[in-house]
């Protein structure tokens, strides 16, 4: 079953008069994400990966084409699509960890008993139960991203959209967070769209990887199935094979960009 | 030496002593009419305190400052928050703000006296104006600077536009609001003195001006020192009030 369907999606941004004219980020892009799968969108920097995520989240509307989630056109942001943002700027620094996580529940007026149960479950899930009364600025980078994940999951969305969530973390923390996110995905069973430019990260995480062409006027170039058993130890011959193929594919885009 | 600085009480006692010595030295090199020695000023201070006039002046100045400042801030904060989130309102206001920000409120004293008379209204309105302006600009800047990620995060957790305003824009702006009302308090002090110098029968500004007329320089000093102490106390009180939310909103004092 298809969870997210993009058909013929183009997205242009108006020029602001200083940085030049209009810019076409996406051009007639097609994409299908299946219900319950872990989908990674992989591509070189500036290729419009985040634009795709913004369209699915409803932060932005396509210039042409259709974006559908569970057969309904996306009209704007909604609690059915949780978003984990790239940076901690998305957290509310004046709220504690638990207040951040229960924000959506409070906005939608859920009763206190239910709220406490959901809060406990999600804090437990991301391993933040002990830090629930802390403020975000008292947490490490990895913990802040855990708060974002718990906060998104607390609203029980159908889809979890993750926009390079571990890009700002150091290598060790990133690796741990990748393992965590696979575990959380296995437990929570959500459809995940995960944006990254890190090939290894995409192979560790994804059921399928969508490789994007270079921008501007980007599309999805190919879909790669990752049929490796989980958990995935790095650097098996199968892993290396996928890695090399993806690397060559992305390298070709980067080369072409330089030659333009 | 580090120990000396570590004990705050000793440090500030030494600082006070140093100030007194320097003051005495300057006074000794000058004449009381230009620069009265500390003991003359202390005597003037006690006499005006004893006959109740100083308390009356302080009460009047505080009354004008607090009423004007409170009204100004009460108007500025909601207006700044709304203007910060509306492009049209901002576009209308921007040229006026850019124009009026370079005109010191003192320049309006004469106009306010013509419009609102010599009574309390003109002075309080002038303070309302000066407080409102500063508090508004700071609130506006804060509301405009709310990270788009925070707004979007709220939206995709199901918050309505109203909720996003109330639970994201407003709290995100709190540090700017606090800065705004602090600066507004400082401006209110400057403005009240100017207004009292020009047209008042009471207040610390009046005390300063009146003492000048009678060549009582020590009372001019009393007025100036009183102002410093009043500002110090007001700022301390405001800090005490905001301390309750300071940690949550990461306000550095």
Image (cartoon, grey):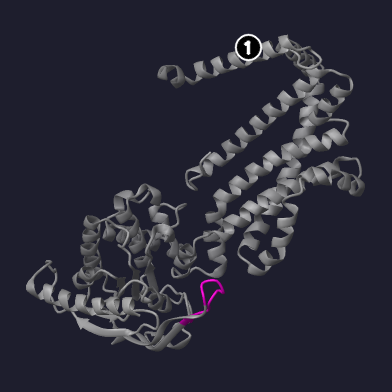
Residue at figure coordinates x 74%, y 59% from the top left: B96
Residue at the (57%, 55%) spot, across then down: B142
Picture quadrant where residue A233 is located: bottom left
Q: Which residue is mark 1?
A: B21
- How crowded pointer 1 is (Cα within 10 Å; few <14, some 14-19, many 20+) is rated as few
Q: Quadrant of residue B79?
A: bottom right
x%, y% of residue A242? Answer: 15, 77
Q: Residue at x 38, y 48 (%)?
A: A133
From this viewpoint, which residue is outermost toward the front?
A259
Secondary structure mostly seen in magenta is: loop
The quadrant holding residue B217 is: top right
Where is residue B119 shown, x and y percent of the image? 89, 40
Residue A13 counted in the magenta span: yes
- Could you tell me residue A89's position as x and y percent? 43, 59
Q: Which residues are magenta?
A: A12-20
The answer to whether residue A193 is above or below residue A62 is above
SS type, badge 1: helix
Front residue of this view, candidates A21 and A88: A21
Give the percent coordinates (x, y) of residue B224. 74, 25
Q: Toward the viewer: A256 or A54?
A: A256
Image label count: 1
**Is the N terminus of chain B in the top left, top right, bottom left or bottom right quadrant?**
top left
Q: Is residue A108 visible?
A: no
User: Horizontally, is B128 left or right of B180 in the view?
Assistant: right
Q: Residue furthest left?
A: A237
Instruction: Kindly identify which chain the residue marked by label 1 belongs to.
Output: B
> In the figure, is residue B78 to the left or right of B112?
left
Q: Is residue B20 above or below residue B159?
A: above
Q: What residue lies at 80% left-to-right and 28% top-to-bottom?
A: B57
Is B53 placed above or below B104 here? above
Residue A17 belongs to the span the image colors magenta = yes
């Amino acid at each position: 079953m298809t969870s997210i369907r993009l058909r013929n999606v183009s997205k242009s941004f108006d020029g602001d008069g200083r940085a030049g004219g209009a810019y076409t980020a996406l051009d007639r892009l097609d994409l299908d994400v299946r219900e319950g799968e872990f989908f990674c969108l992989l591509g070189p920097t500036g290729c419009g990966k985040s634009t795709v995520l913004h369209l699915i989240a409803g932060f932005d509307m396509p210039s042409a084409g259709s974006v559908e989630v569970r057969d309904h056109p996306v009209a704007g942001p909604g609690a059915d699509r949780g978003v984990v943002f790239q940076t901690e700027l998305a957290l509310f620094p004046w709220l504690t960890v638990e207040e951040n996580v229960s924000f959506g529940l409070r906005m939608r007026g859920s009763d206190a008993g239910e709220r406490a149960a959901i809060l406990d479950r999600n804090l437990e899930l991301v391993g933040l139960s002990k830090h629930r009364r802390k403020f975000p600025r008292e947490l490490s980078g990895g913990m802040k991203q855990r708060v974002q994940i718990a906060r998104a999951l607390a609203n029980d969305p159908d889809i979890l959209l993750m926009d390079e969530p571990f890009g700002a973390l150091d290598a060790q923390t990133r690796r741990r967070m990748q393992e965590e996110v696979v575990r959380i995905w296995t437990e929570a069973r959500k459809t995940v769209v995960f944006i990254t430019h890190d090939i290894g990260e995409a192979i560790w995480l994804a059921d399928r990887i969508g490789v994007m062409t270079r921008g501007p006027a980007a599309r999805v170039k190919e879909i790669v199935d990752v049929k490796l058993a989980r958990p995935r130890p790095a650097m098996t011959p199968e892993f290396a094979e996928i890695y090399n193929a993806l690397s060559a594919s992305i390298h070709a885009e980067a080369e072409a960009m330089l030659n333009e | 030496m580090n120990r000396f600085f570590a004990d705050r009480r000793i440090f500030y006692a030494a600082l006070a002593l140093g100030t007194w010595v320097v003051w005495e030295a300057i006074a000794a090199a000058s004449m009381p009419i230009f620069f009265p020695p500390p003991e003359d000023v202390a005597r003037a201070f006690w006499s005006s305190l004893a006959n109740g006039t100083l308390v009356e002046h302080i009460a009047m100045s505080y009354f004008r400052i607090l009423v004007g400042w409170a009204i100004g801030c009460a108007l500025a904060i909601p207006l700044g928050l709304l203007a910060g989130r509306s492009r049209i309102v901002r576009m209308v206001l921007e040229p006026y703000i850019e124009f009026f920000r370079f005109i010191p409120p003192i320049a309006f004293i004469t106009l306010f006296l013509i419009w609102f008379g010599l009574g309390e209204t003109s002075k309080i309105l002038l303070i309302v104006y000066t407080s409102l302006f500063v508090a508004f600009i700071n609130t506006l800047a804060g509301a405009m600077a709310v990270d788009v990620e925070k707004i979007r995060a709220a939206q995709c957790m199901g918050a309505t536009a109203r909720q996003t305003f109330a639970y994201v824009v407003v709290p995100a702006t709190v540090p700017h609001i606090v800065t705004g009302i602090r600066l507004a308090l400082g401006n209110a002090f400057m403005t009240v003195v100017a207004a009292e110098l020009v047209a008042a029968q009471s207040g610390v500004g009046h005390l300063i001006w009146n003492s000048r007329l009678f060549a009582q320089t020590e009372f001019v000093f009393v007025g100036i020192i009183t102002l410093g102490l009043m500002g110090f106390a007001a700022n301390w009180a405001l800090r005490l009030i905001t301390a309750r939310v300071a940690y949550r909103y990461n306000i550095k004092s």
